[in-house]
Amino acid sequence: MKMRSNFKDDLSIILKGYIIGSSMSVPGVSGGTMAILLGIYDRLISSISNFLKDIKGNILFLLKVCIGAGAGICSLSFLIKWLLEHFPLPISMFFLGAVVGGIPALYKKTKESPLRISSGLYFLLGLITVISIGFIPEGSISISAGTGVTHYLMILLTGIVIALALVLPGISTSHMLLVLGMYDTMLTAITEFDIVFIGILGIATLIGVFLITKPIEWTLNRFPHQTYCMIIGFVIGSTSEIFRDKILPAIPASAHALWWIGSGLMSIAAFILGFMAITSLAKYQND
């Protein structure tokens, strides 16, 4: 019976890692957001922040998440990209439903303390922060420029920024790479197997993750109510990028009534499906 329970727990962690990995290619949906919506965020942060306290247990847990995320990135992300190209509106609405579907679970975490005026201020701070980041023009910071030592220092800085986007909910990793002017550079490095570039970027990202998780865990433990109010702001703010970059461009300027009926029904169904999928998974939280 215990073996069956452990297997079910392992499968649940791998599945959640799979969803986190596959969703990271979608603008407006961050890995941190999906980890929170799936109820695995706190445990992820704790495993990294307190890595040395239980090395074996933390390695096993992180390995399961990484196996799932890696499988998601290598398989479902390609399908998601294809679906976004051919059915942008319903698929974007599915992810919008998934993001909205996780908000009730987040709200429950804030109810450990009564809501106050300051709760609304923290929520607004999170909301404004993510919306503001979404409006930073693509390529406005040219980190990919330069040669020699300067170039690799810029890669190091990029890795730390990627770590922030990975760990903080509501911040899209793909959008941050576009802002830094590193998205195309990174894709080229991957396709051309630039081991030096990928290695430095990977190490920098790993360093950034370990640097960032400790302060996040401290705030979650010390100020859980305020932190989750801000996280709700992050998550709701992330929906603006889905609307701006995916949903609105998918609506034709000369859309006729038949298009609205067909696409509208598909989009509503996709939104409900995304909402129900996340609320169902939230019942099996691992925190």
Image (spheres, helix red, strand yellow):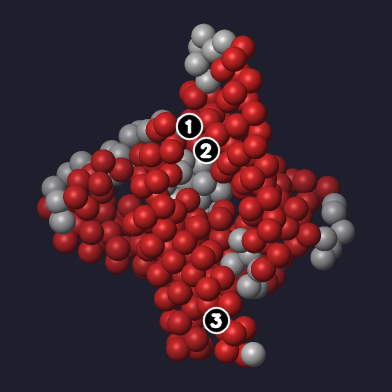
In terms of secondary structure, where does tag 2 sit? Answer: helix
- Above or below: residue 83 compared with residue 107: above
Label 3: how many Cα within 10 Å (few below 14, some 14–19, many 20+): few
- Above or below: residue 38 compared with residue 93: below
State the mark number for residue 91: 2
Q: Does label 3 or label 2 sit earlier along the sequence?
A: 3
Q: Amino acid at mark 1?
A: Pro
| Residue closest to the far right | 114
Q: Amino acid at mark 2?
A: Ile
Give the mark toward the camera: 3 or 1. Answer: 3
Residue 5 placed where, x, y %?
Answer: 62, 83
Q: Residue at x 26, y 48 (%)?
A: 186
In terms of secondary structure, where does tag 1 sit? Answer: helix
Q: Residue at x 59, y 15 (%)?
A: 258
Q: Amino acid at mark 3?
A: Phe
- Above or below: residue 99 compared with residue 83: below
Label 2: how many Cα within 10 Å (few below 14, some 14–19, many 20+): many
Residue topped by disc 3: 7
Residue topped by disc 1: 88
- Kindly check if marks 3 and 1 are in contact, taking CB atoms under 8 A apart as contact: no
Q: CA distance from mark 3 to mark 1?
A: 36 Å
- Kindly check if marks 3 and 2 are in contact, taking CB atoms under 8 A apart as contact: no
Q: CA distance from mark 3 to mark 2?
A: 31 Å
Q: Is residue 229 left or right of residue 3?
A: right
